[in-house]
Amino acid sequence: MKSLHQPSHLSPTLTLRTVPLPQPTQPNDLLIQVHAFAPTLGELSWAAARPEFYLEDREPVPGTDVAGVVVGGPATDPQGSGRFKPGDRVFGLMDFTRPGAGREYTVAAAPTMARLPDGVAFADAAAVPMGALTAWQNLFVHYPGLRREGLYGDEGRARRENAGRRIMVVGAGGGVGTWAVQLAALAGAEVVAVASGSKEELVRSLGAREVVDYTKTTVAEWVRGRPEREVDLVLDCVGGPSREHSWWAVKEGGMMITIVLEPELKQPQELKRKIEAKWTLVERDGTMLEEIGALVAEGKVKAIVDKAYGFDQWEPAFEKVMGGRSAGRVVIKIVDE
């Protein structure tokens, strides 16, 4: 089979090789024919930056998000009494300690995979897992103020409670941010999106009530002297100066959550408010992903695909992703639908 390969974890260089098919070895393993996968910004430098997350003998294949068809493995049940059987359409987030999905066949742990609903294309499904799971877990697991029951049109207590929450998404036009805007808005919260002006139309279409164009003003300037603009939660998807300015938007007793690991996560000393701060790392969860997939199939949320490339176009695809130039996810299709 054809497989992408990163010869050195110290370099982002990739090559395309012909190698034997992978062999499932663990009881929970699924062998999956990859139809589409999605690279993630920065993934070619993760092993160098955080070697503790990786096994030394890990085969260096990139590709974090996968969509494909189950063809075998110890976790399958041909009789259909188990969770998966050969022929099932699935999608999920690859285990970072294993080879990724940038190859014609890959091996994934069954608990991390979800059934792909009928009517959802593989290319769209490959754009879901990383961003959607990250947004979901930060909004409904790590932040206690937003109730996921509000996602399902309940006009009772859950949506009333959610309607009183203001959620700011920093990096609202990115792979995680677009999901956070959609899910928070669908749950009934008031969403403030921090994005460039070029993405204002997109984030408003996804449910943002207000948009702060960071190319024209900082969040600190936008909120200064206007307490009604303060928010209950800032979900930071970019880090750096944007996050530093965003502290000023969090109201007393509010929360700052970041998905970007940096040396310190401390509010400015001159900001005298009680704010809870947390850094989070996405967890792979097939059951949670199936719930998200059902919302996608119903048209309540959607994957934002910047562009779908063929496998023979993997070089420009990765260049676009690693250059941070995509609006939404870049997807690489191995099998045409």
Image (cartoon, grey):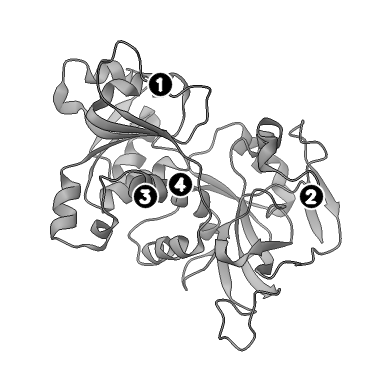
Indicate the secondary structure of the residue bearing disc 3: helix
Along the line of sight, the residue nearer the viewer: 37 or 72: 72
The number of numbered badges drawn on the structure is 4
Cα separation between marks 4 and 2 = 25 Å
Q: Amino acid at mark 1?
A: Lys
Indicate the secondary structure of the residue bearing disc 2: loop
Cα separation between marks 3 and 2 = 32 Å
Pinpoint residue 152: horizontal percent, then vertical percent.
26, 63
Q: Is residue 321 left or right of residue 294?
A: right
| Residue 59, label in figure | 2
User: Which residue bears the numbered disc 3?
Assistant: 141
Foreground mark, 1 or 4, reads 1
Circles 3 and 1, Cβ within 8 Å, touching? The answer is no
Cα separation between marks 1 and 4 = 22 Å
Q: Is residue 197 visible in this depiction of the protein? A: yes
- Answer with mark 1 or mark 4, whichever residue precedes in sequence: 4
User: Which residue bears the numbered disc 1?
Assistant: 266
Foreground mark, 1 or 2, reads 1
- Answer with mark 3 or mark 2, whichever residue precedes in sequence: 2
How packed mark 1 is, by other alpha carbons closer than 10 Å (few <14, some 14-19, many 20 or more), is few
Indicate the secondary structure of the residue bearing disc 4: helix
Q: Quadrant of the C terminus?
A: bottom right
User: Which residue bears the numbered disc 4?
Assistant: 134
Indicate the secondary structure of the residue bearing disc 1: loop
How packed mark 2 is, by other alpha carbons closer than 10 Å (few <14, some 14-19, many 20 or more), is some
For the point 81% across and 36% down, the residue is 8
- Answer with mark 3 or mark 4, whichever residue precedes in sequence: 4
